[in-house]
Every structure is written in structure tokens, then in C-alpha cells.
Image (tube, rainbow, N blue to C red):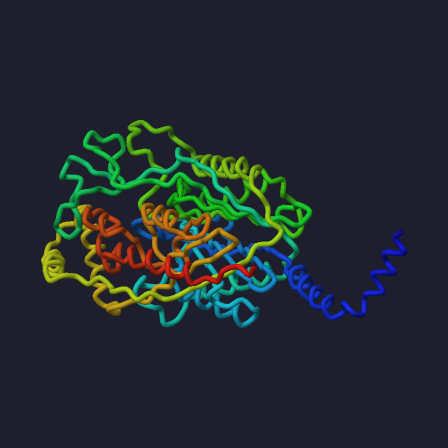
Amino acid sequence: MLNWNLRKIFGTFASCLVLAMFIEQGFADEAGKVFRAGAATSNITPPLGEMIVGNWQPIPATNVHDELHARCLVLDDGDTQLAIVLCDNVGIPREVFDLAKQQIQDATDIPKSHLLLAATHTHSATTARGKSKMIQDEALTAYQTFLAQRISDGVRRALAQLEPAKIGWGSAQEPSEVFNRRWFVDDPALLSNPFGGVDRVRMNPPRGHKSLNRPAGPTDPEISFLSVQSTEGRPIALLANYSLHYVGGVRPGDVSADYFGYFARFIEQKLNARDQFPPFVGILSNGTSGDVNNINFTDAKPHRYGRYEKMAEVAEKVASRVYEAHQQIEFHDWVDLDAAATDLELKTRKPTEEMRAHFAALDEESSDTKRQGREAIYAKRVANLDKAPDTVDVPLQVLKIGDLGIAAIPFETFTETGLEIKAKGPLGKTFTIELANGSYGYLPTPEQHRLGGYETWMGTNNVQLDASEKIVDTLMELFESLQQPAQ
Ligand SMILES: [Zn+2]
């Protein structure tokens, strides 16, 4: 029976040859699209003695508590490659990321538009910034050059690890570790600003203070994540995203990746991915946390944590939620990839005549109270903005991974903007990585600008007041411009 069938098939073989070849070609195209992934980490720990920024006054690094990394993930759908890199730093200027992108583009097939490079926003790394966020550096420092090279080397190493892979994504909720740090308070003494005016909201008000009224904005409890595994199920990398500024609690002078580094270790343990080769890469990216930190302001007598204890606790919680949700996700053998990027021109904020007069009058006084210190800092920041170009081109980018969208914004973005992008994103699910591809300061919404507070002050925020709206509109246009998957 079988032989007869085979003879019959072979008998009609010649007449069907052309059709068969055509069909074969079609299958070959489909079958030829193998999804692959690779991941690698580059050590980006700075030399001791460099300046740690992220607090009011920079201090020199005197110890390394834990190494800093650029954590790199490369995805390949057979046609298109994307790379996502998270660096343990408070904020990296565009010049540094652009140098890394140029090096990657020169050495690989990945175009710049398909490279999403971002900082985690740990506050215990040394500076990778230049003198000003709004004035491009003419020459990069030794650490900036080193950082760019380590990022590009990490992407090239992740490319060298590419292997057939499956991919899945999902999300979990952890509302207990996110607090909006901007509060309406009933005491005007808490609302003064360095411009001689009075705000309506206060950043980081005193804990448990009787004048606390209500938070001025929302929080986003979602932890989004993306997981890649070998076809046999060996974990390759997991990229998570949570909208929490950082945790802190380091010894002064310590270099640390904060809870982002602990998360990478904990998720590796939970996925049972230790001591494998190529090494598993856990990555925690920062969502939209410009106005959200880890302080419960209504708690007047908080638990006293030891150094590093709190960040480990928060990272453990976030990794646990991701691990639980990870058990439920569906893995895909293949998804299509795409990316789009553009520059958006924004106006630089410039001081008014009143502001100039206010700071000029201050120069003539000699008292040295704390408030004067704060005003002196802003006098300098505003003078710096005055020297900056009138406009700045900020890089915006979107990635498409199947029906998952990732938006990239080079600012410390407010949570309500992140929630808006999640709601408006045209793909099945969307999240935002902030401080991506550059670092230009805080990005309050126009409504939050009206309320005032630290993040809105000129010199903390550097661009036109409706920038967040223009950015969301541009990101949505970029998402719409992406190709539809081939049928
Ligand atoms: Zn910060």
C-alpha cells in the first residue's frame, strides 16, 4: 500500500515539480525564521575616587559594595535584531550612548535605531555626566569613554551568544513598595521654593508630619517582565520593569547598583539559573518613577533598617512577584521584532527677568543658612540653563516584540505619563523604560508643573512645560509607524 502510494506520488512528481518548488520555497521562508536570543554583562565599575552623584552634594567613591554592570540582551527574529542594555548609573548623557551606538553599528548589523540603552538610576554610582545636562560635552571623560566601550562590547558579546530561543512576557503587581513622593501639605512653611515663591506641593515631606494632606499623583504597582529561554528551557535572560526611583541605604562613599543589582541576583536564584554557561542575565529596568520612591510618608515611626537591608528586601519582593507570574506565562517559538526612533526638538527653559533679579539680589547677601545654600545651587543651575542652546533634540524610541511594546524616554518620567503610555499603547501590552538613550532631568506633566515642587523647578526640569504631552504624542506616532507582522 505504502509502496503503491509512493510510486503514485513519484509518478506525478515531474508534473508537480514547479508547484512543489514554489511551496517548498514558501515553507523554507517560514521555517528559516528562527528566533534567537543572547545576553551578556559588562562590568562598568568606576575607579575609587571618582565622584558619586545622586545626592545634594557629590562625594568621592571610597569602596565598592557591589560591582556595577551594563546588562545586555539581544533578540533576533531572523530578519531584525534589537538590543536592550541597562547600565547601573544615575543617568547617562546622550553623547555617551551615541558613542556606544556608533561602535555597535560599526561592528555589527544592528542599526542605532534598534539599540535601547538606558540607566537604572542607582544613586550610588559615580558620575557619567558632563558639566550640564543641557550642554553637550566637547570631549568625553575617561570614565565616559570606558562606559561607551563596555556597553558596545557587552552587546557584541550578547550577539556572540545568540542561540535559538523562546520568548514570553507577563506582569505582576507589587503596590507595597511604591509611594508618590509629592504631597499636598497644609503648612506653607514647607512649600517655599528657591525662586522666592511658594509651591502647592512638597517633594519628600517630613514623615508622619501633621500637615500631610494627600499625594499629588498616582503610583504604578505593575512589574512588567520579558523572559527568554533556550528551546530546551534553560533561562537566558529576564528583563523586568518597575516604577520605583531606587531604594538606597548604602554606606556613604560606597559604589552599589542598589536594588537593581540585588534583583538580578535574586531572579537568577529563583529561576535556578546559577553557574550555567553562557551565564544567565537578570535585568531590572526603571519604569516611570520621577515622582515615586520607597518612602511611606504616613508612617511616622518607620522600622530602622541596617545598611543594604531595605534594598535587598524590596528586590526580593519584586523578584518573588516576577517569579510567581513567570510560572503562568506563555512562551512563543517566534515573534516579530521592530523598532523606530526619532529626535524631538524641545525648547530649553530660560529664566525670567524676576528670577534673574532674585538671584542677583541673593549674591549680595552673605548669610549662609540652609535655604541660602539651596538658592545658591539653583542660582548656578539657572545660570547654566541660560548658557544652554535655545532648543534640544531629545531621542525617542519604541520597540515592538510580538505584541509587546517598549517606549524609551530620556527623562526621569512621572508615573502618570507611564500610565498614559500603558493605556494608549496600540500593542497588546506596553511599558516604558526611562532615562533611555540620554538624560535630561525630570519630566513633570503640565498639571504637575502648575503644582510646583522640586521636580518642576527650573534647573531640575530643563525643557518646555508641555514636553511630556509632545513626547507621548511622538511615541504613539512611532508605534503606529511600525510594520505589521508578515502574514
Ligand atoms: Zn533620582
Horizontally, is 5 left or right of 251 in the view? right
Q: Measured from the top left, where is residue 274 in percent x and y?
A: 63, 43
> Which residue is more in the foreground, 138 or 215?
215
Q: Is residue 286 something one can see in this rendering?
A: yes
Q: Is residue 351 above or below residue 328?
A: below
- Residue sitting at 13 percent across and 46 percent down? 198
Q: Measured from the top left, where is residue 145 in percent x and y?
A: 46, 66
Q: In this view, does 484 lie above or below 62?
A: below
- Splitting the image into 4 quarters, where does residue 142 fall? bottom left
Q: In this view, does 33 lie above or below 238?
A: below
The quadrant in which the C terminus is found is: bottom right
> Which residue is more in the foreground, 421 or 221?
421
Horizontally, is 85 left or right of 122 in the view? right
Q: How many labels does the image show?
A: 0
Q: Measured from the top left, where is residue 338 in percent x and y?
A: 50, 61
Q: Is residue 65 something one can see in this rendering?
A: no
Q: Measured from the top left, where is residue 109 in percent x and y?
A: 56, 69
Horizontally, is 443 left or right of 398 in the view? left
- Splitting the image into 4 quarters, where does residue 181 fall? top left
- Residue sitting at 26 percent across and 59 percent down? 462
- Residue sitting at 68 percent across and 61 percent down? 27
Q: In this view, does 75 lie above or below 389?
A: above
